[in-house]
């Protein structure tokens, strides 16, 4: 048996397999990337409508720079703004979408992403009654934990993360031109 059969052929065969698999992955990505992007945009728009149901559409606002804020959208009909903000929780970032109406009141908040401890911190971010405490509060100034909104016992870090994300959204709302 010569070197070509023992060393060369397996290298060529494995290289061809790698090229074919890479091409198949690239083709799959090319086909699915637009579908995934459309689904992401649809989910974001649905979340914006959830926190600001009076809106008829949204326009992204540029020029607002607040730490922790990733997106600021205003309603096309002047109903208010939907702001996406995040803060560090116990298990990772807590990403929150906050709806603020044209009068400067929080309409509602929705947690769009979280990795809090199941059964403890998740009680804060997945509890509709807890999140409802934010509805109707003024966005004129930052909120204070245990004054404007009660912390959940045993989940202070997660309660603080949610409050910090909402306060970042309030700061962004107050910077909208």
Image (cartoon, rainbow, N blue to C red):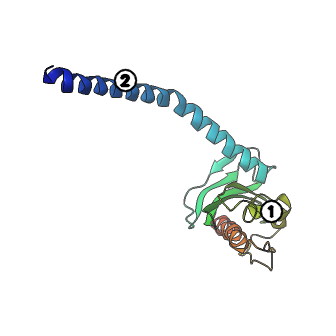
Image quarter of the C terminus: bottom right
Neighbours of disc 1 within 10 Å: few (<14), some (14-19), many (20+) = some
Which residue: 56% across, 56% down? 62
- Residue 87 visible (yes or no): yes
Does residue 92 appear to the left or right of 31 in the view shown?
right
Question: Which residue, as the protein is rendered here, is positioned at the far front?
Answer: 1
Question: Which residue, as the protein is rendered here, is positioned at the far bottom?
Answer: 147
- Residue 136 visible (yes or no): no
The reply to whether callout 2 and callout 1 are in contact (CB within 8 Å) is: no
Image quarter of the N terminus: top left
List the residue tagged with mark 1.
Answer: 131
Does residue 153 appear to the left or right of 176 in the view shown?
right
Q: Secondary structure at mark 2?
A: helix
Position of residue 62 relative to residue 121, above or below, is: above
Position of residue 48 relative to residue 66, above or below, is: above
Which residue: 48% across, 31% down? 29
Position of residue 53 relative to residue 117, above or below, is: above
Which residue: 19% across, 27% down? 7
Q: In front here: 62 or 129?
A: 129
List the residue tagged with mark 2.
Answer: 20
Q: In front here: 50 or 105?
A: 50
Which residue: 62% across, 63% down? 91
Q: In front here: 9 or 161?
A: 9
Does residue 156 appear to the left or right of 148 in the view shown?
left
Q: Secondary structure at mark 1?
A: helix
Q: Quadrant of residue 149?
A: bottom right
Q: Quadrant of residue 148?
A: bottom right
Does residue 1 appear to the left or right of 76 in the view shown?
left
């Amino acid at each position: 048996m010569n070197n070509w059969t023992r060393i060369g052929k397996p290298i060529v065969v494995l290289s061809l397999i790698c090229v074919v698999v890479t091409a198949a992955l690239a083709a799959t990505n090319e086909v699915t990337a637009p579908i995934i992007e459309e689904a992401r945009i649809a989910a974001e728009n649905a979340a914006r409508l959830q926190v600001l149901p009076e809106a008829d559409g949204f326009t992204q606002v540029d020029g607002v720079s607040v730490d922790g804020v990733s997106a600021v959208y205003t309603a096309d009909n002047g109903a208010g703004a939907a702001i996406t903000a995040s803060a560090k929780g116990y298990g990772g970032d807590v990403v929150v979408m906050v709806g603020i109406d044209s009068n400067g009141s929080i309409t509602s908040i929705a947690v769009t992403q979280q990795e809090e401890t199941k059964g403890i911190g998740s009680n804060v971010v997945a509890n509709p009654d807890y999140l409802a405490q934010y509805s109707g509060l003024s966005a004129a100034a930052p909120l204070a934990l245990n004054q404007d909104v009660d912390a959940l016992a045993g989940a202070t870090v997660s309660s603080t993360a949610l409050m910090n994300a909402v306060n970042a959204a309030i700061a962004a709302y107050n910077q909208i031109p």
